[in-house]
Image: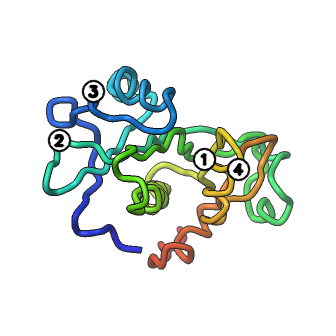
């Protein structure tokens, strides 16, 4: 799925993007973008990416965050761990937050954000090791959304998508294995 030409995804820039105008269905996610996203980016605890309309690049149509995490080897399905080292914890990428602005509902912004996040996570996995993308859905609706992208149950509410599944899922060229 290619990014729609009327939007682009870029790293959050507080000098350009009007965070105070953003509002989504989750008060917690609205508050995060408005008050904490920039601080977390500055402290390098997460990177925040925003999708903006080309017609108004200061307006935020949605956002997501990525950061590093680990997965306990014993919590992964055996078929996934066959060729992985036997470390107690394996490196992964956390898709920590994802939200779409209310005024962009029904325009496929959530799908566009997911595609960009998965593509970015996959591309970065060859530079910073990562065996999967992990999400922690806040409710059943979010879990269903992530499931449409191939995410599988991990532990409790968490879900994961093996990094090796992303190229086929998104129609990307698979990176050469070392």
Which numbered disc, 1 or 3, marks the residue that appears first in the sequence?
3
Circles 4, 1 touching at the beta carbon (< 8 Å): no
Inter-mark Cα distance, 2 to 3? 11 Å
Which numbered disc, 2 or 3, marks the residue that appears first in the sequence?
3
Inter-mark Cα distance, 2 to 4? 32 Å
- Residue drawn at 72 percent across, 40 percent down: 89
Nearest the viewer among 21 and 73 is: 21
* Helix, strand or loop status at disc 3: helix
Inter-mark Cα distance, 1 to 3? 31 Å
Image coordinates for residue 29, horizontal then vertical, percent: 47, 32
Q: Residues within 10 Å of mark 4 (few under 14, many from 20)?
A: many
Q: Which residue position is annotated with label 4?
A: 159
Whether residue 47 is situated above or below residue 154 in the rendered picture:
above
Q: Which residue position is annotated with label 3?
A: 20
Which-is-in-front pick, marks 4 and 3?
3
Whether residue 111 is situated above or below residue 94 in the rendered picture:
below
Q: Which residue position is annotated with label 1?
A: 92
Inter-mark Cα distance, 4 to 3? 31 Å
- Residue drawn at 56 percent across, 77 percent down: 168
Which-is-in-front pick, marks 1 and 3?
3
């Amino acid at each position: 799925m290619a990014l729609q030409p009327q939007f682009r995804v870029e790293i959050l820039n507080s000098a350009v993007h009007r965070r105070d105008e953003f509002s989504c269905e989750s008060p917690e996610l609205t508050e995060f973008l408005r008050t904490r996203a920039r601080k977390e980016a500055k402290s390098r605890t997460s990177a925040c990416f925003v999708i903006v309309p080309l017609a108004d690049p200061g307006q935020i149509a949605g956002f997501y965050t990525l950061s590093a995490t680990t997965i306990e080897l014993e919590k992964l399905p055996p078929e996934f761990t066959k060729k992985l080292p036997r470390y107690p914890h394996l490196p992964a990428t956390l898709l920590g937050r994802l939200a779409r602005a209310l005024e962009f509902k029904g325009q496929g912004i959530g799908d566009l954000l997911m595609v960009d996040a998965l593509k970015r996570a996959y591309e970065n996995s060859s530079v910073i090791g990562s065996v999967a993308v992990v999400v922690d859905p806040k409710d059943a609706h979010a879990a269903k959304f992530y499931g449409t992208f191939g995410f599988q149950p991990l532990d409790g509410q968490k879900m994961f998508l093996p990094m090796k599944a992303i190229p086929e899922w998104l129609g990307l060229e698979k990176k050469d294995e070392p």
